[in-house]
Amino acid sequence: MKKKSLVALLVCTMTLASTPVAVFADSYDDQIEAKDKQINKLKTEQADAQAQIDALTADIETVNKKVKELEAKEETLTNETLELQDTIAKLKVRIAKRQEKINAQARDTQVNGQASTFIDAVLGSDSVSEAISRVQAMSTLVGANQDLLKQQQEDEKAVEEKVQENEAKIKELAANQEELANQKEAIANQQAELKVMKASLATEQAKTENDKKDLQAKKAAAEAEAARIKKEQEAAEKARQEAAAKQAAAAKKAQEEAAKQEAAAKEKQTTNTSSSSSDSKADVEESVTTPSNDDSNNGGSISTEPSTPATPSEPEEEIETPSTGTGGKDHSNSGNMYAYGQCTWYVKSVAPWVGTYWGNGAQWGASAAADGYRVDGSPEAGSVVVFGAGQMVGDWQASGAYGHVAYVQSYNASSNTITITQGGMGFSNPGGPNTQTLSASGFQYIHRY
């Protein structure tokens, strides 16, 4: 009697990958931090510039004070120049009148002669005392003329000195005016430089602030996108868990039905065996016959050979053992019930003959063997390679809880390496194919035939 082993239907319970799909918040945080440092640096530079501006402002105040002093001095010089010019003008008028008088006396002297004037004065006197008086008068007149001439000379010298003094003050005034103009120009230049410096720093800070705002906006957008993706993943995970729960319930129900069928088969087999034993005993008892009275029997004989017992009936349903190399059950028409983006989904999509309820990647070897497939350590193109929980897949490690599966694209016997294609949330293309070449040793392989 053949016995049928029951295969438990396993449900894939792989969770969503923990690695974010497209979150750049950390990168934006680094850039924003760099902008903050730049802004702080600009603020420090602005503070230094403001200190320089304050110092220059103090210099400007000093210069302005000096300018005011120069302006006051300029005003004083201007007033002194006006007074000097008035004095010179009066002296010139006085000199001109005196010069006219001197010129008249000179002409009279030239016409009449000085000596004859004195002789006439003496000779025309009535007495000696009158002559003396006349001589004294003439001497007084000559002395007055000499005083007039001397005063004229002094006034002319004074005018010349006043003119030189006036010219010196005018030159000083011009020099002061030039210095004042230079001071004002220097102040204007300093003020312009300060304004340019402040405007430049303000512009650079404003630009940096705008760059920071742009980065903050991009970060917010990235976080929103990450939240959206996470929400979609959570929804997909919830749907997958609900489907897994339904599959688990279906598997449990199938196990219970299989257990009932096996118990019924055993009970029926026991009943049939008991019935066959009773029938055989009855046949043995009835195998002894009485002699026949028919003369034609020539006395006949008694048969002591028992009849052949009836063969027990077979059960209605046979229990079959798993296949060990002739090819397991083809599940090509079962559809892909695994979650998209998982390694199991990818292998089912490229090798539709694999089972739909083989569980997580690490469970596929046992599930496939129970389903009649050949499972061994021999690599072969077209087979499925199974990685245990936490087993290394080349230079990376499979999940410590779920393992991993991949499709063997080719096998290189000379280097003992396999080239596989695979899927999974940890790859840039979760739906696959993602190609990798690695050593073929140490893995289970599920073979189609």
Image (cartoon, rainbow, N blue to C red):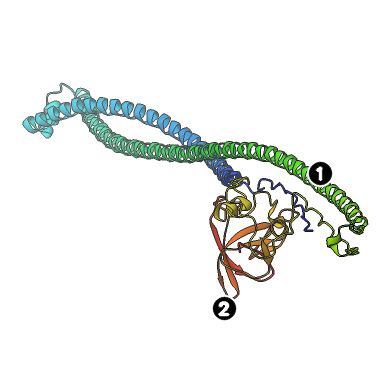
Q: Residue at x 71, y 62 (%)?
A: 391
Q: Are marks 1 and 2 in contact (CB under 8 Å)?
A: no
Marks 1/2: CA–CA distance: 52 Å
Q: Is residue 182 left or right of residue 343?
A: left
Pinpoint residue 440: horizontal percent, then vertical percent: 63, 70
Q: Is residue 114 left or right of residue 436?
A: left
Q: Residue at x 87, y 50 (%)?
A: 275
From the image, tell me which residue sits under label 1: 260
**Dot 1: what SS?**
helix
Q: Residue furthest top?
A: 126
Q: Amino acid at mark 1?
A: Lys
Q: Which mark is residue 414?
A: 2
Asked if residue 136 shows in the view, the reply is no
Q: Residue furthest front?
A: 295
**Dot 2: what SS?**
loop
Q: Residue at x 54, y 36 (%)?
A: 217
Closer to the observer: label 1 or label 2? 1
> Observer-nearest residue: 391 or 373?
373
Pinpoint residue 312: horizontal percent, then vertical percent: 82, 55
Q: Is residue 323 left or right of residue 90?
A: right
Q: Quadrant of the N terminus?
A: bottom right
